[in-house]
Amino acid sequence: MAEAPQEWLRRIQAGEPAAAERLMGEMFGPVRRYLEGMLRNPAQAEDLAQEAMVRLVEHASEFRGEASLRTYLFQIAHNLALNHISAAPTKREEYGSEAPLSKEDGRSGAFETLALEEERRRVRLALGCLPPRQRSVVILRAWEELSFKEIARVMGLAEGTAKAHYFFALKNMRRAMEAENGP
Amino acid sequence: MDHEEAVKRLIIGGPVPIEAASHVEGCVSCREELAALHSTEALLKRAKPSIEPAQYHARPALEARPSRIRRRALAAAAAILLAGLVGGWSLGRMSGQQRTAAPSREVALAEVPWAPSSEDSTLSLLQSAYPVADRFSSVTTADTTSYMEPE
Ligand SMILES: [Zn+2]
């Protein structure tokens, strides 16, 4: 996104389909993946991702440009996810179910190994054991590759707190995976 | 520096204090813990779901299923339209009946034969009677914001 984000949002608000299409093309997938990681429910993730996109445009005037558009969008998505989780807490067993996350790519497909599938299942299970804020930090860091500074902004935390969440999330995930493997 | 703090400094990246690095170097349990956490981190990264391009190109969110915002916009537009039509109907009835007792709003609404009962009927009503409704077929937020209630 080379253009200034404000200009981009202005074009979308002015009803330029190409601008909206480009926003969707670049941002919808990552936001949907983040929400699916958070909620473990593809249909809800899809709905909330769409809601996040609409809100981005709706609240465009509040975007000051201190952060990237991507960070701002994840901030909206994060708040939607937390509201959703607090309204209807995700059951752990449901979160860790066999339901796959978004369809996998060429790394997988026909060449998907059973080992990789098993790894993904274990990660889903471990993510489901995390408190929502820890889950959010690890997904934003490991999957969306945000810096801790960006994560802190998304989540409204101090950078040091975001780092601590990440560290304890990894510890908790490791513990959950060990517990699953048994003694 | 305690064990946990030393490992944390190495996990979160960035500049590592010499104290943390030297502790971990000389501490077997910290080295094991660090290796285990690095392995968990690598596993997590490998499990990253990829994005299917068709997923978003096929379904632009701003015009896909009726969103809450779109419903809000439709409801607001329908209310304006309905109020206008009911008002007109009431006035017509009043003049036709030599201004007998005016019907209450509830009675008037109940007697309107085509009173919309669902969003779909509201939409078709809007499309037939309210030119702006046509714009919802290619809805963008720019189209809907002016009809939205504040959050
Ligand atoms: Zn140690």
Image (tube, coloured by chain):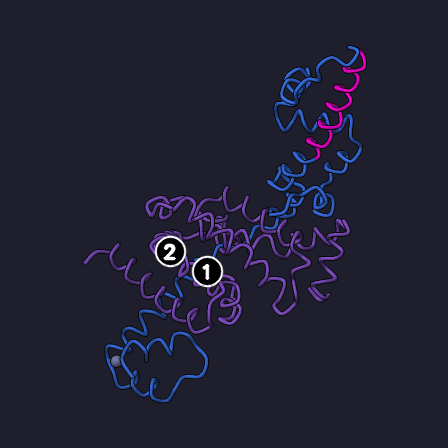
Chain colours: A purple, B blue
Q: Earlier in the sequence, mark 2 or mark 1?
A: 2
**Residue in the picture at 72% in, 37% down:** B136
Q: CA distance from mark 2 to mark 1?
A: 9 Å
Residue neighbourhood size for the residue with mark 1, other residues' Cα within 10 Å, grouped as few (<14), some (14–19), many (≥20)? many
Q: Quadrant of ligand 1?
A: bottom left
Which quarter of the image is occupied by the N terminus of chain B?
Answer: bottom left
The label on residue A139 is 1
Q: Is mark 2 within 8 Å of ligand 1?
A: no
Q: Check if residue A35 falls in the magenta segment.
A: no
Residue A129: x %, y % from top left: 33, 54
A83 sits to left or right of A174: right
Q: Check if residue B91 falls in the magenta segment.
A: yes
Give the amino acid type for the residue marked by disc 1 in the picture: Ile
A137 sits to left or right of B39: right
Disc 1: host chain: A
Q: For the residues labelled 2 and 1, say whether their Cβ atoms are less than 8 Å apart.
A: yes
- Give the extent of the magenta segment: B77-96
**Residue in the picture at 48% in, 71% down:** A148
Give a yes or no on whether discs 2 and 1 share a subunit. Answer: yes
A149 sits to left or right of A122: right
The residue where tag 2 is placed is A127
**Residue in the picture at 32% in, 74% down:** B34
Disc 2: host chain: A
